[in-house]
């Protein structure tokens, strides 16, 4: 059971709270897949109801299912509804209140209505807590003034929820009675608006696209206190944490939380299962530090290995987890280890078509009587095969009791009553043991692995129905420079076509990421800042090209410098120029060189492993192969060189020109030759390090 969207609502029974966000007001938050929007402040119930209704309409139109939680009781203790409506049907109670509650932003009749309800019962009560200056008939100001009204003080939920207040208190610390009276009319109207598409838990089975549930933020008080940012209103933070938790729960866990008996009082989602509620959630990873790219002081020309080690040590996964059916998980990075749900094979079975018996078979001719029937995959033989008997058995069929060995059908002579063959044949021949491939509880795939088609088959065979995977990394691509034009446009002699953006977009897409083309920006800092703002709002990482050095027109470096997060790396690499790295609104930015050859090489060598780490795949070294050179080359000490190369006649050939302006060499090449930092002279036939382009992949 999963929902595409989760909406958490912290309700209020009070009057309009004004324009400035305040505590004890109405707060809303939406979460999807463990990621939330910012909490939304609502100054009054009227604004909140309009927003909630419009939100649900939009979700319906988009084909998304929604779990909506409200932090007030959905029902009352037994006997209350009977006095109002003649039954304890909670929906009848909701309609009763919806017909009688008068509500405006700065006034409502909840106290007077509570007094009228009290008059229906003997004694005094059950409601109390008159919060007005005037006296109200039948509504005491203190709970101790009540007596003989005949109703339980708490619902079953409040009896189990430590610290929960009863539904009868209308004012004062911990009062929830007003929230209920002013909340259930909203739920009643939502039921009418979405009559065919809404179900309420635990009164109904959740088979509709909108599910309404009761929540209580105090169940996760520890998680709220541990994660609340300084200065944030607690009510706002707790709906955000709840939305994050519930939208990120595995489907099986949510199903467990919802598995409570139907009743007419209502129940708090997660009550009694608090540890499960908190322990299974994976909150969004924390943002990167503002100095995550900063090299140690004194660093001048940085070796490639040092730069890569710095990225590995200072970056982390930035994507939250979500639970997906195995069939939908291809290409995703696992967020947790996967363990086998059942053994594979689950029972001893035959590896071939043949005849099964109790082995071994001695040397010589062996004759066995055939039992009636056969064993086939999915149609097991339920009886025991007697000694000195055999049974017809097909590939994949479970071995019946009394069978541990199978002889191939090509090696036997058989009629309707007997089978014969030549031995010897050892016990267990042509038979598979239960669990010989995978055992129950065995870790079959590690966290961080990118799921392959073969992995899907293995997980399915092991009974795994769904897995926790990382949401796909969102990579923004931005080119900069006044001189750039899009291919196909008119360009004069002083302009060039933007080769980097289509190249980098395709490269990131080939790595399996969601690519967001941010366009090309001019050499104007205000415009570029706006484009980075747009990118940071919808991307997890941004790759830019151009403007990444320290010149007058290197605006990308200047913008990152203004954030206080710029690290201008002077890497000892050819081709390449300094890399500009930093954070823009907490989103990492890789400022690649503007030259297409340098941009491609730097993307492969530096961005690819970094993006894999941020996507949840961990850090993986790019595979390298030693192959004979088909070229001659000398290089000086002090920097790493990458040459465009391909295989011809079992030797590695390099592009005739090493000029970084020769973009055609990227298309000619199928990989790179890596020459390490030391001085060296390469002759034809010497072994060199070759890195196919296909190995630069998550």
Image (cartoon, rainbow, N blue to C red):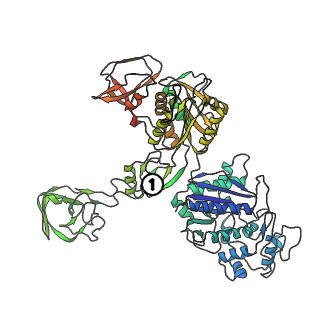
Q: Position of residue 452 (x, y in %)?
A: 40, 48
Question: Which residue is denoted by mark 1 in the rendering?
Answer: 328
Q: In the image as oriented, which residue stretches furthest toward the right?
A: 134
Q: Position of residue 557 (x, y in %)?
A: 61, 29
In the image, residue 18 sits, relative to residue 402, either above or below, namely above
In the image, residue 494 sits, relative to residue 38, either above or below, namely above
Badge 1: how crowded within 10 Å, few (<14), some, or many (20+)? few
In the image, residue 317 sits, relative to residue 492, either above or below, namely below
Camera-nearest residue between 639 and 162: 639
The quadrant where residue 411 appears: bottom left
The C terminus: image quadrant? top left
Residue lying at 74% horizontally and 46% vertically, measured from the top left = 231
Q: Position of residue 370 (x, y in %)?
A: 17, 69
Camera-nearest residue between 359 and 211: 211
Residue 275, visible in the rendered structure: no
Residue lying at 73% horizontally and 60% vertically, measured from the top left = 47
What kind of element bears circle 1?
Answer: helix
Camera-nearest residue between 622 and 61: 61
């Amino acid at each position: 059971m999963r929902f595409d969207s989760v909406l958490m609502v912290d309700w209020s029974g009070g009057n309009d709270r004004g324009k400035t966000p305040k505590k004890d007001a109405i707060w809303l938050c939406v979460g999807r897949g463990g990621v939330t929007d910012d909490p939304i402040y609502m100054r009054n119930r009227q604004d909140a109801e309009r927003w909630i209704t419009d939100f649900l309409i939009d979700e319906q139109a988009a084909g998304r299912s929604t779990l909506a939680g409200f932090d007030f009781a959905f029902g009352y203790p037994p006997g209350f509804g009977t006095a109002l409506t003649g039954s304890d049907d909670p929906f009848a109670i909701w309609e009763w209140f919806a017909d009688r509650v008068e509500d405006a932003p700065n006034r409502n009749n909840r106290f007077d209505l509570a007094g009228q309800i009290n008059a229906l019962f003997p004694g005094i009560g059950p409601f109390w807590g008159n919060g007005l200056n005037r006296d109200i008939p039948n509504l005491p100001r203190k709970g101790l003034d009540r007596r003989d009204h005949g109703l339980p003080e708490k619902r079953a939920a409040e009896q189990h929820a430590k610290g929960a207040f009863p539904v009868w208190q209308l004012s004062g610390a911990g009062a929830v009675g007003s929230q209920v009276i002013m909340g259930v009319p909203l739920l009643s109207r939502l039921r009418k608006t979405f009559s065919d598409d809404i179900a309420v838990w635990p009164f109904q089975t959740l088979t509709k696209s909108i599910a309404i549930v009761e929540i209580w933020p105090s169940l996760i008080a520890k998680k709220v206190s541990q994660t609340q940012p300084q200065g944030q209103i607690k009510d706002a933070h707790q709906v955000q944490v709840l939305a994050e938790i519930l939208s990120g729960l595995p489907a099986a866990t949510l199903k467990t939380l919802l598995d409570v008996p139907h009743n007419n009082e209502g129940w708090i989602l997660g009550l009694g299962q608090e540890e499960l509620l908190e322990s299974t959630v994976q909150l969004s990873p924390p943002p990167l530090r503002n100095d995550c790219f900063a090299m140690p002081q004194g660093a001048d020309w940085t070796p490639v290995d040092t730069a890569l080690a710095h990225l590995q040590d200072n970056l982390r996964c930035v994507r939250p987890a979500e639970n997906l059916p195995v069939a939908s998980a291809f290409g995703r990075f696992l967020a947790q280890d996967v363990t086998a749900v059942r053994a594979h094979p689950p029972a001893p079975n035959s590896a071939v078509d043949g005849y099964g018996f109790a082995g071994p078979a001695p040397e010589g001719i062996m004759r066995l009587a055939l039992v009636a029937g056969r064993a086939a995959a999915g149609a097991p033989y339920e009886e025991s095969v007697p000694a000195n008997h055999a049974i017809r058995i097909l590939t994949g069929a479970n071995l019946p009791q009394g069978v541990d060995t199978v002889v191939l059908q090509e090696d036997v002579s058989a009629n309707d009553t007997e089978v014969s063959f030549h031995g010897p044949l050892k016990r267990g021949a042509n038979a598979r043991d239960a669990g010989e491939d995978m055992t129950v509880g065995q870790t079959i795939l590690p966290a961080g692995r990118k799921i392959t088609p073969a992995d899907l088959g293995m997980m399915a065979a092991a009974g795994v129905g769904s897995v926790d995977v990382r949401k796909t990394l969102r990579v923004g691509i931005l080119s900069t420079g006044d001189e750039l034009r899009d291919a196909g446009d008119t360009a004069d002699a002083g302009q060039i076509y933007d080769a980097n953006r289509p190249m980098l977009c395709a490269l990131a897409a080939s790595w399996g990421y969601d690519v967001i083309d941010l366009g090309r920006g001019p050499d104007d800092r205000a415009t570029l800042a706006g484009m980075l703002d747009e990118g940071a709002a919808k991307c997890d990482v941004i790759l830019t090209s151009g403007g990444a050095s320290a010149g007058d027109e290197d605006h990308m470096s200047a913008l990152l410098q203004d954030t206080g997060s710029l690290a201008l790396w002077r890497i000892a690499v050819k081709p390449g120029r300094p890399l500009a790295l930093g954070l823009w609104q907490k989103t990492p930015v890789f400022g690649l060189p503007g030259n297409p050859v340098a941009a491609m090489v730097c993307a492969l060598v530096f961005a690819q492993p970094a993006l894999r780490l941020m996507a949840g795949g961990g850090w993986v070294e790019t595979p390298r192969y030693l192959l004979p050179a088909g070229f001659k080359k000398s290089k000086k000490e002090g920097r790493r060189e990458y040459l465009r190369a391909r295989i011809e006649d079992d030797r590695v050939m390099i592009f005739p020109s090493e000029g970084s302006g020769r973009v055609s060499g990227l298309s000619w090449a199928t990989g790179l030759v890596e020459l390490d930092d030391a001085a060296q002279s390469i002759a034809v036939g010497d072994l060199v390090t070759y890195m196919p382009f296909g190995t630069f992949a998550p």
